[in-house]
Image (cartoon, helix red, strand yellow):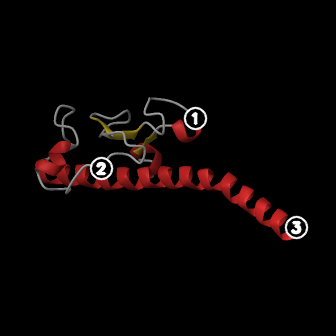
Amino acid sequence: MIVVVIIGLLAGLVSYTIPTFMGKAKVNAAKADISTLGGGVNAFFLDKGRYPSNQEGLQIVVTEKFLPKIPLDPWGHPYQYLSPGRNGGFDIICYGADGREGGTGLDADISNADIEPAKK
């Protein structure tokens, strides 16, 4: 009987913590995707002398063969591209789990400005 109770407690603990770890893993995957996409945009800049326009978007880096494809974010939404970005250059944005701008926790926006070192 004690063994069954212990197993039940462990199962409850595992089922409680798995969603937290899955959420953190998705945030880290989004950051990795944004970093890769940013590398493609920077390669485009080095080759063409300009950032892709908003009309061209991220798709131009695939067309020009700087990246093989543009993935969806871990929640199944497209990444957003903005040029010029909020701080110059460009922004690549993931709107989080809810797919809408703003939010907190897993719904918070993630952008290349959040993962790159501050520019001086």
Q: Which of marks 2 and 1 is nearer the N terminus?
A: 2
Query: Tag 1, which secondary structure?
Result: loop
Of the two numbered discs 1 and 3 in the rendering, the one whose residue sits closer to the viewer: 3
CA gap between label 2 and label 1 equals 23 Å
Kind of residue indicated by mark 1 = Thr
For disc 3, the neighbor class at 10 Å (few under 14, some 14 to 19, many from 20) is few
What residue is at 42 percent from the left and 50 percent from the top?
Answer: 30
- Out of 16 and 82, give the one closest to the viewer: 16
Question: Which structural element holds mark 2?
Answer: loop
Pointer 1 residue: 104
Q: Between marks 1 and 3, how big is the CA–CA gap?
A: 43 Å
What percent of the width, then of the height, locates residue 31? Answer: 43, 52
Q: Name the residue under label 2.
A: 71
Q: In the figure, is residue 25 to the left or right of 39? A: right
The amino acid at mark 3 is Met
In front: mark 2 or mark 3? 3
The kind of secondary structure element at disc 3 is loop
The mark nearer the N terminus, 2 or 3, is 3
